[in-house]
Structure formats: C-alpha cells, structure tokens
Image: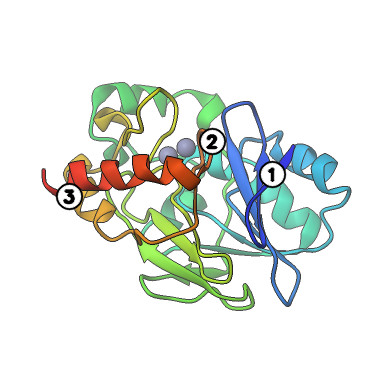
Amino acid sequence: MTTEIAPGVRCLATTKRDNAFLLDGDEGYTLVDVGWGSAPKRIEAALGSLSDIRRVVLTHAHPDHVKGAAELAARTGARLFIHAADAPWLAAGRVPPAGRAGFAGRLLDRVPLVHWTPVTADVLLRDGDSVAGAGGLRVIHTPGHTPGHIALHYEPGNAVLVGDAIFNRAAELGIGPAALAADPAQRPASLGRLPRDVAAVGLAHGDALRGNDLDRYHALLDRWETT
Ligand SMILES: [Zn+2]
Ligand SMILES: [Zn+2]
C-alpha cells in the first residue's frame, strides 16, 4: 500500500508496522530504507516495477531497515547511501555487541533472523550533505539510536523522514526503548536537530504525522529538548 504524505513523498508499508518511503526526483526515484528481506517483493508489488529506483538511502543499519537492501541493490543497480558511522555495521551484516546499550538488545542481535547479507555502501553520508540526484534531500545526523542514524529533510515537499528517532506505536509518540539504542543519552540532542516547521513527518514505524497531528510532534520535541 502506498500513501502520499507530502508532494513527491510516498509511504510504502513493507509490513503492517514497517515503512519505507519513495521520493520523486529528476533522476528516478529515491527509496528511503528498505525493510526486512521480504520488502523488495512488497515494494515491487506496490510500484509495479523496481526499475526506476536509482538510489537507496538507509536511515541506519538495523535489520528492519536494511535486510532487503542487498537484494534491492542487486536487482536495480541503485546506489546505496548510509552515514559513515553505520557503514561498518552494514558491511558486517549485523549489529555489533557494542551497538546496543542494554542486555536485551545484545541478546536480540544473536538471533540469525536479525542478521543480513553484508553490503558495502556506495556513498558515505555526513551531516549537512545533500543526497546527489535526489532533488533536494538533506542529511541530518541524529546519533543515539545508532551512531550513524540520520533523519532526511525532503525540501521540495517539506517532509522530514525521521527513521527510528521517533516511534508512533502507542497513543503517544515515543523515542523507543533505551536498551535497543546504541547511546540513549544522545537522543534528546538529536531530536533538537530536527526541523520543526514541516508539512509532514514520516516515521519508519507507525503512521505519518500531518495536519493537527503535527502538534504531537512539536510536543514530543518540546518534552525531550527540555530534558
Ligand atoms: Zn532501528
Ligand atoms: Zn526500525
């Protein structure tokens, strides 16, 4: 299922709880995150074809975002982008033991299901970069969940894609369990780096925020920035 959340930004549900995003551009589509191993088939079914995807930007190297990346890159020839700090994880095919602050997270990462086919990124991103060819996609480094976690501001549609910096799972927005984050203490400062005046917020997990729901986004930023 695809839903347009802002001009040029479509949300692609790759499972009931996981989202990827498709961005229009002058030079083919940009996919933000892929999803689990079944995601390429789901994305192909939603779009009819994968052939116009020219670049894949990963918000971070966790299995629910990257496990389908090797297949998608192989089938499309798309260039893979990730922040430099998460690139070694992507190339290792798993989250390293030091990549989770809590024991529960480290235990989870031993399960083979959460390992992926190692992939080498084509382009390493840094804070403030514009993704080449994506038509106005700015990188905002938001470390904490992982060292190289990024949010992406799609300037043509004024939408921010926040990856796992914010979750929309329960009645209230949250920032997720500390045990699953690499360095939970970095998360409030990273939230402070997100743009506030946006038309839509796309989340990797849960419904996008638009219209009156943006009040919930602003309230979350206020709550954490003052922590
Ligand atoms: Zn994650
Ligand atoms: Zn996730």
Q: Which structural element holds mark 1?
A: strand
**In the image, what residue type sits under mark 2?**
Asp
Q: Residues within 10 Å of mark 3 (few under 14, many from 20)?
A: some
Secondary element under disc 3, as helix, strand or loop, is helix
Question: Measuring 41% from the left and 46% from the top, which residue is drawn there?
Answer: 214
Which quarter of the figure is the C terminus placed in?
Answer: top left
Report, in whole angstroms, how far the alpha carbon at label 3 lies from the one at label 2: 23 Å
Q: In which quarter of the view is residue 106 placed?
A: top left
Q: Are marks 1 and 2 in contact (CB under 8 Å)?
A: no
Residue 165 visible in image: no
- Residue 162 appears in the picture as rendered: yes
> Distance of mark 1 from mark 3, alpha carbons?
30 Å
The image position of residue 175, as x and y in percent, is 31, 36
User: Up-down: is 135 above or below 37?
Assistant: below
Q: Earlier in the sequence, mark 1 or mark 3?
A: 1
Where is mark 1, residue-wise? 3
Q: Are marks 1 and 3 in contact (CB under 8 Å)?
A: no
Residue 120 location (% of width, % of height): 56, 60
What residue is shown with label 3? 225
Return the residue found at the far right. Answer: 48
Above or below, 65 against 138 in this view is: above
Nearer the N terminus, badge 3 or badge 2?
2
Q: CA distance from mark 1 to mark 2?
A: 10 Å
Q: Amino acid at mark 1?
A: Thr
Q: The N terminus lies in which quarter of the figure?
A: top right
Residue lying furthest left: 227
